[in-house]
Image (spheres, rainbow, N blue to C red):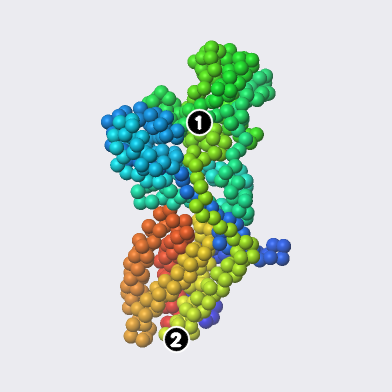
Amino acid sequence: MNIADLKEIVSDWRVALYLVILVLAIISIGPHFEDGQFKTNLQFGLDLQEGSWLQLDFQSVVIGIDTDKPIDQLTADLKAKLDADVIQVAPSKLEVRKLVSKEELTKAFDSLQAGKIVTYEQGVSKNTADDVKQILETKINALGTKDAKVNTLTGMNGITRYIRVELAGVSMKQAQDVVGKQGKFEIRVQTTGNDTEHVLFGDSITSVGIPSQEPAGSGVWGVPFTLSETGANALRNASINTGAVTDPERHHLEMVLDNRTVFSAPLSPDLAAKIQRDPIRELLATTGKGTSALNDAKNLEIHLRAGALPVAVVIAGSGSVSATLGEHFKVMSILAGIVALLFLAIMIFYRYREPSIVLPMVLINASEIIILLGIARFVQQLDLSAIAGLIAVLGTGIDQLVIITDEILHEGKVPSPNLYLKRLTRALAIIVISAATVIIAMLPLAVMSLSTLRGFAIITILGVLVGVLVTRPAYGRIIMYILSK
């Protein structure tokens, strides 16, 4: 093949698009040498580098109820009876933030004459699971940990029982500290100018509620929290001594987490008047109206908890990967890909016995993996399940290239240009239907909270899309030019 032939092939827009995307993928991967080592921009998951993982089991239950009692009254009664936080998560569902057996709950309902329990599931609601996930992600980000993942494992009933934390480059002890360690929370009061003085620490906060509108329907979001008796007295004394009750606008209360101010606001006139008379234990920190205020309230709830999880958890499973083992897995994954590509090449050569057909098929298949890696760098860490997806894409890719080649060489000879295009179109239609089937089959795995399988599904779907939209049309044109010669 001479220069003129290459120009003719590249001038086709499908081939040109394929080459441009291939070059961009190589740039995205960014292969380079640094400190004498070969490195890339690819993100490797826990399987392929040093790190630890924890799977946490929520010590909480979600119950479906049938009751004639007002829900507010029922939750208050159950909270006192069970000595646990109880919140409404649906019109007829309650979340009891304590691992209580069904028998204990049934006895509590009977004693309170509160109706009956319809369903009983260990775990938490989606909102609580999302809160826990956000708290853990906030802690992880504070550590500056890279390549960390927090995944909730939710069942078809919408109840989340487990949450999995993966921390690359972190030891098991550090991983356990991330889950169990609280931050240093402090409330301070503004004295003069920007100076502040200490009022109380986070251990004086006995409970934190969920973001709500107070009063209901007002549109003003806030987070209710309760102080201990000692904390309430400390807040009253500091507010009076600094003038926060007589001139609130010049003496804001500030909430500080790990030496970072996370909330600052003056006492409301009503609260200032009440504090002058008596210590106040039930407080509400308001953030304003609208979606932004709701997000601020959710963040404030996390800060008030000082990183403590709203629901107790126990470690249901854990594991770690050493740096040596991670490197071993990485090398073996590369070898697995090379061996798979080599065996595919042998099988294709055995079928067609023509190097001019085999070489483009193998190169297109290999370049498809490069394009896929360039895209995956932005959307998916490479762990063992993702590597399995890459190898699966190799197989499905060759299948589809064989369909194109066999359709074109239906009678063992190269057809005329018009007939070639008809056969290519028919082959591509078959491939599109096959690709749609694969995507539909993989979608449940990609969207469900199955962290160990999502990587496989996402890589497979991306590989199918890259093949259908980029590499298959380009191969059809390339093979046409080659066979016509």
Does any portion of residue 231 appear in the rendered image?
A: yes
Does any portion of residue 125 appear in the rendered image?
A: no
Q: Nearer the viewer, residue 294 or 17?
A: 294
Quickly name the residue at label 1: 207
Q: Which mark is residue 350?
A: 2
Quadrant in the rendering for residue 431 = bottom left
Say what amino acid the circle numbered 1 marks: Ser
- Across and down, in percent, residue 146 comes to 60, 52
- Across and down, in percent, residue 240 comes to 61, 14
- Across and down, in percent, residue 449 comes to 43, 53
Q: Is residue 350 left or right of residue 427?
A: right
User: Measuring 54% from the left and 55% from the top, which residue is drawn there?
Assistant: 318
Dot 1 alpha-carbon crowd within 10 angstroms: few under 14, some 14 to 19, many 20 or more: some
Q: Secondary structure at mark 1?
A: strand
Say what amino acid the circle numbered 2 marks: Tyr
Position of 365 relative to 372 (above/below): below
- Of the two numbered discs 1 and 2 in the rendering, the one whose residue sits closer to the viewer: 1
Position of 18 relative to 294 (above/below): below
Q: Is residue 191 left or right of residue 130?
A: right
Position of 435 relative to 300 (above/below): below
Position of 225 relative to 97 (above/below): above
Q: CA distance from mark 1 to mark 2?
A: 71 Å
User: Measuring 44% from the left and 78% from the top, which residue is drawn there?
Assistant: 479
Q: Is residue 397 left or right of residue 238?
A: left
Dot 2 alpha-carbon crowd within 10 angstroms: few under 14, some 14 to 19, many 20 or more: few
